[in-house]
Amino acid sequence: MATVNSNADSTDLTPMADCSVCKHQSSLLVAGCCKPGDCCVIANSGRQIERFFRANPSYASDYTQDSFWERRAIAARYLPTSQLQSLLDDPDEAVRRVLAYRVPLGWLARLREDPDREVRITVADRLPEPELELMAGDEDYLVRAYVAKRLPAGRLFRLVADPDNQVRRNVAERIPTVSLALMANDGDVSIRRIIAQRMDSEDLELMAKDNDWTVRYEVALRASPALLEHLFDDTDEEVRLISRQRYDALPLTLSGNTSP
């Protein structure tokens, strides 16, 4: 049971628990291991509960079934790993989020389809690579974005047409260069720019007629002499200018320009 401090200073809203109902009053309180309003496990104050378990971590196991979600969540941070399994099905997402960070990798499969996105994001960030592809179809784009960051590059093909731009952007930054052509017509211009920046120069002709001038500009920055010549007549002045500048800076043997 906790109350608000009723001392003379009416602005002090520090939660104060009733030590008379606490089982630690004759042990930890007497020994100075807890303190009302500061280091207290029965106060409905996350700060005080955290201080209590930091000072008395061995008592965390006594609170895994507590009725207050925050007390269970904080206790979970201090439990020995061997005692975490019973909390995997805790009804509160804050508790399961702690579990997602702490449980052994072999237990993460039980949290892979957790209803809370933050839990699943943490799972996607920790799950061993061989199991990670199982989360590539997650309904939440942020989970899939984490998958796209960690999935082996050779396994990213199933995400090249993901409906979310951030997921595809992560894919574009990591997919093997030989497969970049699969994304050359992506609907997001920022993704097509990434493709133009990473694509092998001999494949850039695929993007030389892109409808966005910034993509064609990226092409011009890396295009072969032959492709640069095609860009001399580009509809955008910036593309024409960089194409001519690059072409003129090429060694004569590469540009084919033998005029004095």
Image: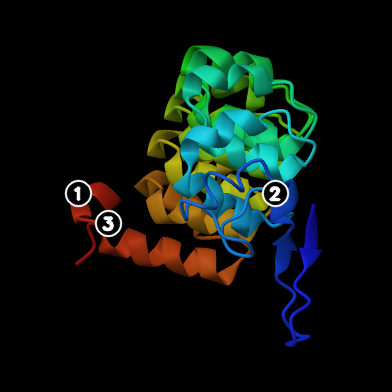
Q: Amino acid at mark 2?
A: Ile
Which residue occupies 57% across, 15% down? 107
Dot 2 surroundings within 10 Å: few (below 14), some, or many (20 or more)?
Answer: many
- Residue 8 lies, with reference to residue 144, above or below; the image says below
Relative to the observer, which residue lies in front, 5 or 157?
Answer: 5
Question: At 50% across and 17% down in the image, what residue appears?
Answer: 82
Rendering coords of residue 57 (x, y %): 48, 39
Residue 160, percent from left and from top = 64, 29
SS at badge 3 = loop
Depth check: 126 or 32 in front? 32
Residue 184 visible from this viewpoint: no
Does residue 190 sit above or below 200 in this rendering? below
Q: Give the camera-side residue of 140 and 172.
A: 140
Asked if the residues shown at circle 2 and circle 3 are in contact, with their CB atoms under 8 angstroms apart, the answer is: no
Decide: few, some or many residues near mark 3? Use Cα within 10 Å; few <14, some 14-19, many ≥20: few
**Which residue, given by chain and number where applicable, does mark 2 sit on?**
42
Between the residue at mark 1 and the residue at mark 3, the CA separation in whole angstroms equals: 7 Å
Q: Which numbered dot is residue 257?
A: 3
Which of the 4 quarters of the picture holds residue 93? top right
- How many numbered circles are shown? 3
Picture quadrant of residue 167: top right
**Disc 2 to disc 3, C-alpha distance:** 84 Å
Pick whichever of labels 2 and 1 is earlier in the sequence.
Answer: 2
Task: Name the residue type under label 3.
Answer: Asn
Secondary structure at badge 1 equals helix
Whether residue 236 is situated above or below residue 222 in the rendered picture:
below
Evaluate whether residue 45 shows in this view. Answer: yes
